[in-house]
Amino acid sequence: MNRTTMSLIGAVAALAAVTGVAAVAAPGDDAGTADSKAATLPVQRSSLMCPAPTSSEVGETTYTAFTPKGAKAGKGSADLRAATDGRSDDAGKTEKGGKAEKDSKDGKDSKDGKSSQESGTKPVAPLKAPGTPVTETTDRSDAPALIGTADGGLAPGWSVQQTTEVSAGTGRGVLGTACTAPDTDFWFPGASTSADRQDYVHLTNPDDTAAVVDLKLYGKDGALKGTTGEDIQVPPHSSVPVLLSTLSDSRDANVTLHVTAREGRVGAAVQAGDDKLGGDWLPAAADPASATSGLVLPGIPADASSVRLVAMAPGSADADLKVQLATPTGAIVPAGLETLHLKSGSTTAVDLKDLTKGEAGSLILTPAEGSKAPVAAALRVVRGKGSGQEMAFIPATKPVGTRATAADNRAKGSTLSLVAPQKGKDARVKVTASAGSGGGSTATKTYTVKGGSTLAVQPPRPSGLKGAYALTVEPAAGSGPVYAARTLALPHGGVQGFTVQTLPDDRGLVQVPTAGWNMTVLND
């Protein structure tokens, strides 16, 4: 009976990691206070998906995988493997000594009939132990999407960062994204169907059965006419890219994409490429927030030359928002934008120009009095001028919670932004730099963020650093809520290449019900 109970607990924790059923332990989260009859346990299995990085012949992609050290690390495994191309009968390709190796058709191994996820494809960035990141690089223009799992002691907080540098062409610059867990519903404010943009949504199916996905686009006047994004089939263990401009005849510079998996589940990310502003990944925004919670968009660089807010109220009611900029010295109201009205079902874009005026900041959107409609939002941020411009995206994100992780940081170019959005509720945060992928020892520093302000810092760096390193962000007990973002700047050819990743909770711990369970047995 004792062992059966332990198996049940492990099963619940694993289910939470894969499906999100259990609540993540997150101080300051809007979900409410945790049930007093709940145990916080490390997840036992995590799933992540990385989209196909680039089709450019002059691009190079680095994958950085990391699991933070924990009190009960234990053994486990963590790696990614190639997905198949869902647009054709050809299976994906995997790395072998830096060269391409083609799998058999339909993702099946000709000898044993197993899918490419189960047969002998070479793993990408496999981890052997927590605490030290592992990197792998490819310059292939046909590098596939990746699907991965981590279990045991490598599952809690397992994070993978995909960073691509493209030296020329549409979408040139630094394209970065944190590989994401599968889900069934995604909102992408800030996408585009305009003639000077090429935006693809990448849909990746990690499961053994096909997924069926609907895509819908919303512009300034509501749903775009002629949308043909229904019943998109994503075969098992495969990835399908869809060019957004093919879904509608309307050409709109600012649209919101809604991705819904009617059958199965997928990973989804939008790759945006602009003729003049380069390219980057647009991650999904946090689930549309209700009136009581508001939205935080952290990490606007101090030298941003242009900031555009794109927002949508997807419900049946209009939304009214108060707009504030959390600066290093406190929250201010941007000139001429005390409130923002969002018409239900339509996308609203507001150019905030050089909003930060030379100081790093974060945007805070809170409901105006009487407004209860949910909202999805994201920022498009531009640095540089003229031919040296480069864009990145900052979606509304969830708070750090128990711990957040940024896997890929370099010796130079990393900036960590921390924002405590509530006035009077300061946040105290411990930031730890891991050992480097090629050597070095950890470093830790604690920061205090005044309520209502943004703190942008050069994070601690491992002593004797060789290779890339990871950062973990952990609020102290009793701290006010804190949100975070990491900017990675990799200038090249006179262009201010950069990418911004928000840092929500890394899902290392989940809360599971314990009512009626013998807690003494849990320690057996």
Image (cartoon, helix red, strand yellow):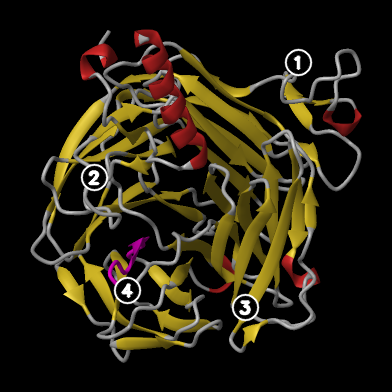
Residue 53 visible? The answer is no
Reading the image, the residue beneath label 1 is 120
Residue numbers of the magenta segment: 291-302
Within the magenta stretch, is there residue 10? Answer: no
Reading the image, the residue beneath label 3 is 218
Compared with 37, 130 (above or below) is above
Q: Which quadrant does the N terminus fall into?
A: top left
| Alpha-carbon span between mark 1 and mark 4 | 50 Å
Compared with 309, 2 (above or below) is above
Q: Amino acid at mark 2?
A: Ala
Q: Looking at the image, which is closer to me, 28 or 201?
A: 28
Label 1: element kind: loop
Q: Position of residue 199 (x, y in %)?
A: 69, 64
Reading the image, the residue beneath label 4 is 291
| Alpha-carbon span between mark 3 and mark 2 | 36 Å
Residue at 34%, 20% in the rendered image: 440
Label 3: element kind: strand
Sequence-wise, the earlier of marks 3 and 2 is 2
| Alpha-carbon span between mark 2 and mark 1 | 43 Å
Residue at 34%, 77% in the rendered image: 355
Q: Are marks 3 and 1 in contact (CB under 8 Å)?
A: no
- Mark 4 Cα-neighbour bin, 10 Å: few <14, some 14–19, many ≥20: many
Reading the image, the residue beneath label 2 is 34
